Image (spheres, helix red, strand yellow):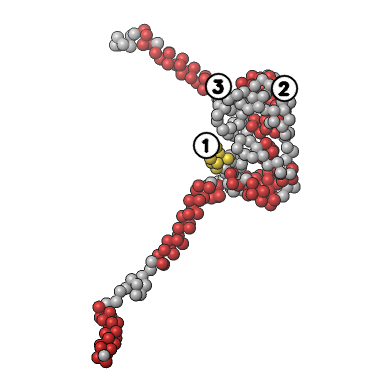
Amino acid sequence: MSAVLRSPKLALLPLAAAIVFALVMLLASGPATGAPRAAGDVGSEEADGALMFKTQCSSCHGLDGLGVENRGPSLESEGAAAADFVLRTGRMPLAAPNLQAKSGPVRYSEAEIVALVDHVATIGGGPGIPDVDTTNADVTNGGTLFRLNCAACHVASGAGAPIGSGRIAPNLVDATPTEVGEAIIVGPGSMPIFGEFSPEDINDVAAYIETALTDADTTSARHFGGAGPVAEGLAAWLLALIPLVALTRWIGRPSEGRHNPQTEAERAEAERPMETDQSTEVAST
């Protein structure tokens, strides 16, 4: 055996490596960032909304919910609908105040969401959670309203698209009818509030998204409509180039007299009568 293998310090290396590996596996097995949490992680099964707000929301929105400068807005005008929307779509809590709130994993249990929503509802006078019912909705009217008011940002398929200034209109395919209704009356992010929509209009739009878009899987690869405006526009230009190229080739096609000039004999024959007329005119003079 060599002196290296007999070194006491080196003999401990396998044990140290095993300990480090065990610690890494233990940490990796813990809850990942953004993963759903059980109700017991914060308070009991009957979650305390005020306590949760104080410990997890007040750093940006303030203890009184009136906002913190350069960190988070006031919640006075938000209400239950806005709170329910951002919590159930994983848009809150936000990692940094300067980021766009995007949908992601839901970070709270049902009990925690209900408790937080109830607490936010006591801060101000924002709209409550809408009662969206798509059972007897008019899908045709919903499609018309969607194309007139929503497709410009979310595209016709509901796949979503960039809308400028680094912001994105989200994909609507996984949105529930309630989330659709909440977005319409709250106007999250860059989305405007559609206050002119009646409850029936909200039902119709939610039904259209639920049936004509989600059930039809319009954003899948087999539906080109889900490709988005950039790809769709490029494809339209490519398709339009085909008749344009054909028209250009037809216009540039060789034609007699323009692209096939006369031969010397033909030119002499064409000029001969003119010379005869000139000579006759000279003789008569």
Height in image: 47 above or below 259?
above
| Residues packed near mark 3 inside 10 Å, few (<14), some (14 to 19) or many (20 plus) | few
Q: Nearer the viewer, mark 1 or mark 3?
A: 1
Q: Residues within 10 Å of mark 2 (few under 14, many from 20)?
A: few
Number of marks drawn = 3
- Marks 2/1: CA distance? 40 Å
Tag on residue 46?
A: 2
Q: Is residue 251 above or below residue 123?
A: below
Residue in view at x 60 percent, y 37 percent: 190
- The disc labelled 1 sits on which kind of residue? Gly
Q: In the image, residue 127 lies at what x, y percent?
A: 72, 34
Instruction: Mark 2 or mark 1: name the one nearer the start of the chain.
Output: 2
* Residue labelled with disc 3: 30
**Quarter-of-image position of residue 255:** bottom left
Left or right: residue 212 versus residue 270 is: right
- How dense is the environment of label 1, judged by Cα within 10 Å: few (below 14), some, or many (20 and up)? few
State which quarter of the image contains the N terminus: top left
Q: CA distance from mark 3 to mark 2?
A: 24 Å
The disc, 3 or 2, on the residue closer to the chain's N-terminal end is 3
Q: Locate residue 4 relative to residue 228 in the image: left or right.
A: left
Q: Quadrant of the C terminus?
A: bottom left
The x and y percentages for residue 86 are 64, 32
User: Is residue 272 or residue 251 the one in the foreground?
Assistant: 272
Residue located beneath label 1 in the image: 166
Reply above or below: 285 against 240.
below
